[in-house]
Amino acid sequence: MKEIIEGLEKRREQARLGGGQARIDKQHAKGKLTARERLDVLLDEGSFEEYDMFVTHRCTDFGMEENVIAGDGVVTGWGTINGRMTYVFSQDFTVFGGSLSETHAKKICKIMDLAVQNGAPIIGLNDSGGARIQEGVASLGGYAEVFWRNAQASGNVPQISVIMGPCAGGAVYSPAMTDFIYMVKDSSYMFVTGPDVVKTVTNEIVTAEELGGAGTHTKKSSVADAAFENDIETLLEVRRLFDFLPQNMNEKAPSRKTQHDEKSLDKSLDTIIPSNANQPYDMHEVITKIADEGDFLEIQKEHAGNILVGFMRMNGEVIGVIANQPMVLAGCLDIDASKKAARFIRFCDAFNIPILTLVDVPGFLPGTNQEYGGIIKHGAKLLFAYAEATVPTVTLITRKAYGGAYDVMASKHIRADVNYAWPSAEIAVMGAKGATEIIYRSELGDKDKIAKRTKDYESRFANPFVAAERGYIDDVIMPHSTRKRLIRAFSTLKNKRQDAPPKKHNNIPL
Ligand code: HXC
């Protein structure tokens, strides 16, 4: 028996070595951790249970039968993060460059199936050269099996992808179908085709970093949600994100005890709105002043800064925040902001996370750039996402809520549950100057007359009371009492029930 046990230990040791010490050293030399070291950082100490450690590929072409490595380039199983279970896979770049074979795909599919069956999230650590070239269509089939499961799991259990090395070809499409993508700066890349192919096909000369590095995907393409300095920081940030997410569509996100008094008042909010309506202020400040312990986990921080999205807790309960940011483009809604916020709202709605919307929006950004880019369709995504949401939704207008953007930003009319405004709110079809210049066009030559008309318009509409008189705003609240009032509003919505009319699925303008 002793020998048998030793035999098992030996096989395990062999499997843990992956592609061998030389390749592990190479991985370390690039500043990257190995697949197993990454799981050690991601998961609670000692919680990882590995499956399929002895699985090997079945390829016999190109001499592959001589090159068989236990585990076949991916470490799979489950573990816990702060005590909560998650399924995981971690690709091992030291084994055939983490490339995906038929059996490598089967291992990933197994844990995806278990995750859906057992209602736990899936976290994938990706570090892969794409399809295992020696396997051809068997590898492509493997990818498609993973993709299909990504779609099935979407909205059922949270899926997080971490890009921790080169991810080419098929290796980018599975992450793209998951809920969140985190990248590591300077060592992770995502592209459908690499720089060499780009050069051949389009004659463009571009580095891997420019084509698909963390900067490109967090700022320009918005494929990735955040990027961090190195493997360790990235994995610790994944743990932080995980703490805001529920296990599955039937559960609530985890509450956490807070020292922050639910009734605390913050006088500094009374002076945060500048006296000049065209002067910006930082909406981050409002968020951190009302969040438990000032903690706000921002998603897509580097992209479309005119809208802020992310998670916080209020009185211990997770809330998804969507907020216009007057510091960027005066808080206007544009294509990028609409897409960013719409996707976030849909995530919150799918996973029972109540939504808080902070509104200071002068309207949709005008111009040919936006119109040709399809702002109508993309803006409609945001409107659609809010209108279809059934989770508790509370809205606070801090300053401007003009025109269509008033309707879109979780107004009462598209079924926000509680709508508040600060006394500084201006709820109108448009700003006073623009409105006056349209309705009094014939008087445009007379500056004094126009100034008086503008003043009249302002005093009639540049306030929250016209909307409050109609019940579109439930109350005009003191800024300093915001945290208390919002916590109380969300507490009334705890048992909210709202069903959508029957359908197979809706047809959001994609
Ligand atoms: C098999 C692969 C591999 C692959 C890398 N390796 N990619 N083996 N299939 N796809 C192996 C290498 O042979 C090498 O083996 C080891 O992994 C490390 O690779 P290097 O090239 O030495 O590493 P590096 O210089 O860091 O470059 C990494 C890389 C490069 C950028 C990923 O290897 C590369 O460009 N690979 C090919 C990428 C690709 O075109 N994949 C197919 C995409 S098509 P040894 O034994 O020397 O250690 C696709 C279709 C799916 O995925 C579409 C579905 C929609």
Image: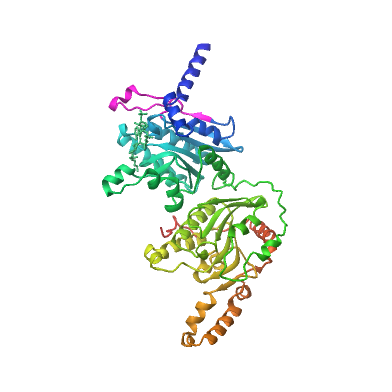
Q: Is residue 265 left or right of residue 29?
A: right
Task: Find out whether residue 110 is within the magenta segment.
Answer: no
Residue 365, horizontal then vertical, whole percent:
46, 67
State how many labels appear: 0
Q: Is residue 145 left or right of residue 47?
A: left
> Is any part of residue 494 visible from this angle?
no
Note whether 73 is above or below 240 in the view shown: above
User: 408 or 365, which is in the foreground?
Assistant: 365
Can you tell which quarter of the image residue 288 is in? bottom right
Note whether 158 is above or below 330 in the view shown: above
Q: Which residues are magenta?
A: 49-72
Q: Residue at x 52, y 64 (%)?
A: 331
Can you tell which quarter of the image residue 132 is in? top left
Residue 411, horizontal then vertical, whole percent:
56, 66
Task: Find out whether residue 63 is within the magenta segment.
Answer: yes
Residue 181, horizontal then vertical, whole percent:
47, 46
Q: Residue at x 38, y 32 (%)?
A: 97
> Is any part of residue 23 visible from this angle?
yes
Note whether 336 is above or below 75 in the view shown: below
Q: Main secondary structure of the magenta part?
A: loop
Determine the quadrant in which ligand 1 lies. top left
Residue 434, horizontal then vertical, whole percent:
50, 77
Note whether 156 is above or below 499 in the view shown: above
User: 236 or 387, which is in the foreground?
Assistant: 236
